[in-house]
Amino acid sequence: MSESSSEEPHSHRYISVPRAVQLIPKSFNGNPLELREFIQNVEATYEVVDPADYSLLLKFVCAKIGGEAKTELLSRTHLDTWEQVKAVLEENYSVRRTLDYYAHRAFTSKQSQAETISQWGARMDTVCGDLQRAARKHMEDLAWTDQKREGGGDIIDLFIRACFIQGLHDDRIKTMVKAKGNVNTPMAQLVEVALEEESAIKSERFRKNFSEKGQFGHQGIRNVPRRPNEPREVRVATVKCYRCKKLGHVSRNCSEQVPPSVDLGRVTGNHGSRNRSGNGQRGCLGNRW
């Protein structure tokens, strides 16, 4: 009784092989650019399958390999584990790029104008992840000691943080990140500072746009917000005359006569519309209506 109860939680950690294979959505047919994604999917599948079912899972994985890659596997013998199959695939289809390539790629990466800080951070995470893997492989090939590897890893981390800061598009965000942190600040903290400043900039722009649209809500022509690319005909058609209350013109171009009962001081905004000599009623510019 106790033995079965102890095995039950263990069995709940895994899923069946046919269900786990669904984590491999695409087959691999020998395209080097797709090898890394295929390997990551397969290794994720192995993590959710009971080790007792690894031999069955390997058959499903090999069924996901086709084309030239399938022919290459069939020409080999004693491929009993996924590690052996993975080694054959990497030997024949892995994109071999140097450490200098990945370092140059990270150094020249820049945040685009339409890219948010979150998107920029995710892209740099991918780029710099490739750089870190290439650096570790380079250290292994040179048989570096643990002390030298640790020092080399620290240098790579400093380089990555510098590339993130330098690649920021907005100068204000870049300045703020440099002020609140530096290349020794953890990467997660640099991203958080950049996100806070991006949020502050968006809030300021929203408040500015809101105040510009609402400040002149009842002052004639100013209550119509102008768009940079809006045709002049459209802008004129939406202008409202505050004398006749019609659209398409302003009061100084209004052709309608002012009724005698209308208070011209209120219409024109000039409460001293009657001149001292009493010669009729004049507008705000001194012209007789």
Image: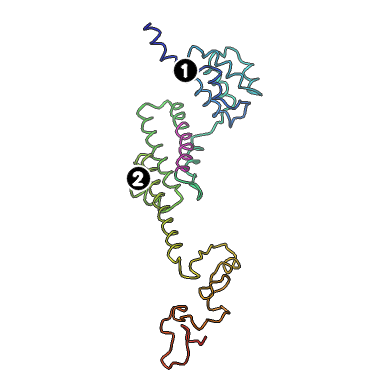
Residue 141 to residue 208: above or below: above
Which residue is located at x 48 percent, y 20 percent?
48
Quickly name the residue at label 2: 182
Q: Picture coordinates of residue 47 (x, y %)?
A: 47, 21
How much space separates mark 1 and mark 2, taking CA atoms? 44 Å
Helix, strand or loop status at disc 2:
loop
The one of 5 and 194 positioned closer to us in this rendering:
5
Residue 206 to residue 182: above or below: below
Q: Based on the picture, tell me whether residue 126 belongs to the magenta stretch.
A: yes
SS majority, magenta: helix
Name the side, left or right, on which 185 lies relative to 102.
left
Q: Based on the picture, tell me whether residue 38 belongs to the magenta stretch.
A: no
Amino acid on which the number 2 mark rests in the picture: Asn
Quickly name the residue at label 1: 14
Categorize mark 1 by other alpha carbons within 10 Å: few (<14), some (14-19), many (20+): some
Helix, strand or loop status at disc 1:
loop
Residue furthest front as drawn: 261
Q: Which of marks 1 and 2 is nearer the N terminus?
A: 1
Which residue is located at x 51 percent, y 14 percent?
54
Residue 73 to residue 94: above or below: above
Q: Picture coordinates of residue 130 (x, y %)?
A: 48, 34
Question: Magenta segment range?
Answer: 118-133
Q: In which quarter of the image is the N terminus?
A: top left
